[in-house]
Amino acid sequence: MRTLDNFEDKLIIGTRGSRLALWQARVTKKLLEKEGIDSDLKIIKTKGDKIQNLSFDKIEGKGFFTKELEDHLLEESIDIAVHSLKDLPTTQPEGLVLGAVLERADPADWLIIRKSCVDNTQELSLKANPVIGTSSARRKAQILHFKPDAIIKDIRGNVPTRLKKLADGDFEAIILAAAGLSRLEIDLGDFFVIKFNPREFIPAPGQGVIAIQTRKNSLSLRRLLKKIHCNDVSQCTNVERQVLRLFDGGCHLPLGVHCRRDQHGNYHTHAAYAISINSPVEFVQISSSTSAGLAHQLFKRFQVT
């Protein structure tokens, strides 16, 4: 078994191969370098990368952007796996743990609109009956809440690919995570952008957060990861992911949860849930001086059958 104390080679970081995934892995690599640890990247293709013709709600199972990375961890061909936290199931395989989460980027979703389709007299400054691209059940449900005349069309591919499809006229607008756009420093000057407030258009649990997963028995490595772990982010995302766990959900579920902590230490949570993408969306907001029991309070406020 490889441990931090007896590495003959560099630490091996498992990552998907998209530009955004590699950006996240390189950030992790730099943080480890500051702690005196050298590492190499190993690119691993996941089920979600291979299946590009289906929307997320049509791909069976959970963890279709994470399972292959987890398999490599368990096989000890990599030492850590770098994920987007929103892609990581709340229940991990036996033998694996979440070793660290990093600083959170903007958790919001942005609506990217072709300028020729802008109509400031309409909801969301978007012309009537627009074709909007997203493969997320959560985004589908919420955009239909705010723009009931929208025509939803599935879209797959990495961020640059989706923007090209928008520019080519396949859609009037698409919805993307602010974190990915900002991290890749993508120029959106050719588009009209609406930056949703995450307290109104509720993001996915863990959105904007980089997660580092490792083996439970890699004790020295886990101690090292604590040095780059952001506890404040963890306290908020733990609430978000606990709500997701209570719903027994994944990417298939039309659920958004966002938790933030203010300067006084109080927690403010916003959540949105729909039974299906065409069902009414229910919004819930709770503030508390503690995160203890907060996820259960949120869950109980929804009319879940």
Image (cartoon, helix red, strand yellow):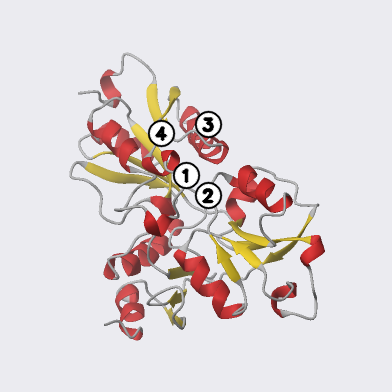
As drawn, the label of residue 30 is: 3
The kind of residue tagged 3 is Lys
Judge depth for marks 3 and 1 and give the one in front: 1
| Residue that carries the numbered disc 2 in the rendered image | 156
The mark that comes first in sequence, 2 or 3, is 3
Tell me which corner region of the image, top left, top right, bottom left or bottom right, holds residue 219.
top left
The kind of residue tagged 4 is Lys
Classify 10 Å Cα crowding around label 2: few (below 14), some (14-19), many (20 and above): many
Q: Which residue: 59% across, 52% down?
A: 179
Q: Which residue: 25% across, 25% down?
A: 3
Q: Nearer the viewer, residue 202 or 239?
A: 202
Distance of label 3 from label 4 (alpha carbons):
23 Å
Residues under numbered marks 3 and 1 in contact, where contact means CB atoms less than 8 Å apart = no
In the depicted structure, whether residue 241 falls above or below residue 288: above
Distance of label 3 from label 1 (alpha carbons):
31 Å
Classify 10 Å Cα crowding around label 4: few (below 14), some (14-19), many (20 and above): some
Q: Nearer the viewer, residue 176 or 214?
A: 176
Judge depth for marks 2 and 3 and give the one in front: 2
Residues under numbered marks 3 and 4 in contact, where contact means CB atoms less than 8 Å apart = no
